[in-house]
């Protein structure tokens, strides 16, 4: 069965259509072509013509012309629209004309770097020219590094390696920096929040070193669809850029389906498991020979869905794979290669495959739960669709209020503009870290600014002098400390390091790795660690050595850990009075401790038992907005005492609706309630950034809390359940019939300031 036949079949397949809340068809779009520019070397255009590319898409020609004029550009077109050619064509053309030219390609992940290397090697080999292209990352052997520094025309790297392995050692990269003509930054939409703020400072350091060596490279940026691509690119590189956003690539007919799992308990509003429904729909597609990618929001869900698919599609289980962070590099590369070559026909992934890794084109994409942003959704659903062919994209809702809102509002999902990417490179902590790194790389001149608008640079240098880190000599600030500052900074997380998972039966065999903050909930003692559908029992987690020891088992259950969170307010920066209490924002200290785990049976999802977790507490300093409730007033308004149950329901609905108004991922925030706040002594709900230091979400929530409360009330009113359910105020114990009304009234107190 081909994809068109499957679409026709699904339209009359009642078990499927009965759960479809919306089915939207988008017409195919023809390509818009332009000829290859005359200024491009004929040997290069001949190679692409041999590959079947007779003309360029209009956006490819527009980008090439802009680079030719010496402009910095950002290209924003859909998935699989040929953005790679927008930079490879002008870069290779320049090097064919001047072999001394150099280019630096920056990708957010090693996988994308390897992908790009394979693409470039193929073209360069056909030219017969000596354009040396290398990846330079943590996997590059020491024996190859000297040759890359001396002879690499195109150096492909990631922000982490640029930060710690290239910029601090610029004196042995002289040929690169003296002749650097192009800097390519791909997937710039992934540089948001803390990661993006770090990258912007990396670009300040890069351009400072380029000025020292007398080079001024052009920047070519590429992005998935976001609301503010030009603004974001300009914030990252602090230069004016030309926006290229009118795609000339063709697009086949597309079908978007919003699928709501069936209600299994109408009174309680409980729906069938989205995980099991995803496996059921995925099995339907794969058993009809439709290549499919399924996106899940967590590593655990990814492994569970993969396990179910392999059970239900036994004849092709070897052609089904899971893909997520924590797999070893060679394992991930093998899966990517299998997808490109068609050996793997079904893959279940976290958002790790959302980025532009070449995995070929699949026929169907399934997203389990709203991924947290319109931009991510477009990226995931855009993974389906072979050129000129129809494609199918299915969004399967969970029972959460956010998913239930979305599955019943197709206009929001498919008609909304993508979110904007936001960064704050002048965050004092991040800025200070990079000024340290920049001082290590080159002395600062007195009066020099790290960025044009940063008049505070001198003050920060003087502060570092007072701390004994810098020494002023004449008109220069010199590095004096014996530490290597780049090693003190993590660009992506505040985690110390990853945990390695080792097979107890063969200590030389590493199964995978887990980041610091995820370790307590995924690889605690007695956990079942899922990896490619296999189950491994964690015999022991050695916290100090950052190692977990395991052995393979055939388990009929998986484990799911629970954590206890304790919050202390460090500083209140702003507050305002609302009818039902006080709204504040500021800095908090969050302490998380994994306390117990449940054993969940595969397929039935019943609870088989539990166990305790004995691991150290983890601390984080971050930004928060919080509500201290006026207990007496809310008791009167809600018609019942302000119980922990009521606070839980208020926190539950806010947790799900805040991301809609802060343009953030679901995982970027956490919400916790306290019956007695450690700070105010009053009942409180805290909404805080899940990233150490914060990324501005709490500040945004402080401004829009009225809109959040109003939409939360609307979700509760529209929900058909009688006493509260996972689709509005959370699962409730039987008999608590009036809590929906109480939550609605409590939220109403957040809509306005008190009268008088």
Image: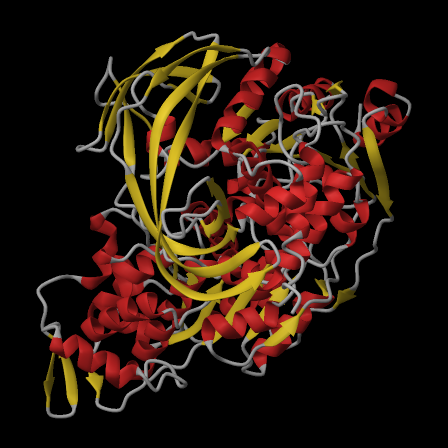
Residue 698: x percent and y percent?
50, 58
Foreground pick, 386 / 434? 434
Residue 48: x percent and y percent?
63, 58
Foreground pick, 638 / 147? 638
Instruction: Choose top left, top right, bottom left or bottom right for residue 544.
Output: top left
Residue at the spot 36% in from the left edge and 77% down from the top edge = 207
Describe residue 12's horizontal placement relative to residue 664 as left or right: right
Whether residue 298 can be seen here: yes
Residue 63: x percent and y percent?
63, 71
Q: Is residue 330 above or below residue 458?
A: above
Assign the C terminus to one quadrant of the image.
bottom right
Foreground pick, 463 / 253? 463
Describe residue 66's horizontal placement relative to residue 507 as left or right: right
Residue 330: x percent and y percent?
38, 34
Residue furthest to the right in view is 12
Foreground pick, 365 / 603? 603
Instruction: Choose top left, top right, bottom left or bottom right for residue 81.
Output: bottom right
Instruction: Choose top left, top right, bottom left or bottom right for residue 58.
Output: bottom right
Residue at the spot 33% in from the left edge and 70% down from the top edge = 428
Q: Is residue 389 above or below residue 700?
A: above
């Amino acid at each position: 069965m081909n994809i068109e036949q499957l679409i026709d079949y699904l339209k009359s397949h009642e078990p499927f259509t009965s759960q479809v809340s919306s089915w939207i068809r988008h017409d195919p779009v023809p390509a818009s072509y332009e000829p290859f520019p005359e200024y491009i070397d004929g040997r290069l255009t001949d190679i692409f013509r041999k590959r079947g590319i007779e003309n360029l898409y209009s956006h490819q020609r527009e980008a090439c012309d802009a680079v030719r004029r010496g402009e910095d550009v950002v290209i924003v077109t859909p998935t699989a629209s040929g953005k790679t050619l927008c930079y490879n064509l002008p870069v290779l053309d320049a090097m064919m004309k001047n072999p001394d030219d150099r280019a630096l390609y920056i990708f957010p992940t090693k996988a994308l770097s390897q992908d790009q290397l394979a693409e470039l090697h193929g073209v360069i080999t056909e030219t017969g020219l000596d354009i040396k292209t290398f990846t330079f990352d943590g996997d590059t052997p020491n024996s190859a590094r000297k040759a890359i520094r001396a002879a690499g025309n195109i150096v492909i790297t990631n922000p982490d390696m640029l930060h710690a392995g290239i910029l601090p050692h610029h004196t042995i990269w002289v040929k690169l920096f003296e002749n650097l003509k192009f800097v390519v930054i791909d997937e710039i939409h992934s540089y948001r929040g803390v990661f993006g703020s770090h990258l912007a400072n990396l670009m300040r350091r890069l351009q400072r070193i380029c000025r020292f060596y007398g080079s001024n490279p052009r920047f070519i940026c590429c992005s998935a669809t976001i609301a503010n691509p030009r603004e974001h690119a300009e914030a990252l590189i602090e230069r004016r850029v030309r926006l290229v956003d009118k795609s000339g690539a063709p697009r086949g007919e597309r079908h978007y389906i919003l699928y709501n799992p069936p209600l299994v308990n109408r009174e309680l509003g409980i729906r069938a498991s989205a995980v099991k429904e995803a496996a059921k729909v995925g099995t339907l597609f794969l058993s009809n020979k439709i290549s499919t990618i399924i996106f899940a929001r967590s590593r655990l869900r990814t492994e569970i869905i993969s396990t179910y698919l392999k059970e239900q599609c036994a004849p092709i289980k070897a052609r089904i794979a899971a893909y997520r962070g924590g797999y070893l590099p060679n394992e991930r590369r093998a899966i990517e290669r299998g997808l490109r070559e068609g050996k793997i026909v079904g893959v279940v992934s976290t958002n790790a495959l959302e980025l532009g890794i070449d995995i070929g084109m699949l026929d169907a994409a399934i997203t389990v739960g709203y991924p947290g942003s319109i931009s991510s959704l477009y990226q995931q659903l855009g993974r389906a669709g072979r050129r000129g062919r129809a494609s199918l994209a299915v969004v399967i809702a969970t029972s959460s209020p956010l998913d239930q809102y979305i599955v019943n509002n197709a206009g929001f999902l498919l008609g909304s503009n993508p979110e904007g990417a936001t960064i704050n490179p002048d965050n004092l902590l991040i800025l200070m870290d990079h000024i340290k790194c920049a001082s290590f790389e080159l002395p600062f001149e007195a009066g020099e600014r790290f960025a044009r608008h940063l008049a505070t640079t001198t003050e920060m240098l003087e502060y570092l002098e007072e701390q004994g880190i810098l020494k002023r000599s004449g008109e220069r600030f010199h590095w004096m400390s014996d530490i290597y500052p780049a090693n003190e900074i993590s660009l992506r997380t505040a985690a110390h390091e990853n945990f390695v998972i080792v097979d107890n039966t063969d200590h030389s065999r590493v199964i995978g790795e887990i980041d610091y903050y995820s370790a307590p909930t995924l690889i605690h003692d007695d956990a079942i660690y899922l990896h490619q559908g296999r189950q491994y029992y964690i015999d022991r987690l050695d916290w100090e050595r950052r190692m977990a020891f395991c052995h393979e088992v055939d388990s009929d259950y998986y484990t799911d850990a629970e954590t206890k969170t304790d919050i202390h307010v460090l500083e209140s920066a702003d507050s305002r009075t609302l009818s039902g209490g006080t709204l504040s924002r500021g800095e908090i200290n969050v302490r998380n401790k994994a306390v117990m785990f449940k054993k969940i049976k595969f397929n039935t999802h019943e609870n088989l038992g539990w166990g305790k977790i004995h691991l150290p507490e983890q601390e984080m300093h971050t930004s928060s907005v919080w509500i201290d409730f006026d207990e007496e007033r809310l008791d009167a308004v809600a018609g019942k005492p302000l119980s922990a149950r009521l606070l839980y329901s208020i926190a539950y609905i806010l947790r799900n609706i805040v991301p809609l108004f802060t343009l953030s991922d679901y995982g970027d925030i956490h919400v916790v309630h306290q019956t007695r706040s450690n700070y105010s002594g009053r009942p409180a709900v805290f909404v805080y950034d899940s990233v150490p230091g914060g990324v501005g979400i709490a500040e945004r929530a402080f401004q829009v809390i009225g809109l959040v409360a109003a939409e939360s009330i609307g979700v509760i009113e529209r929900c058909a359940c009688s006493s509260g359910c996972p689709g509005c105020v959370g699962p409730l114990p039987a008999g608590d019939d009036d809590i929906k009304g109480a939550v609605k009234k409590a939220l109403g107190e957040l809509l306005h300031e008190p009268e008088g």
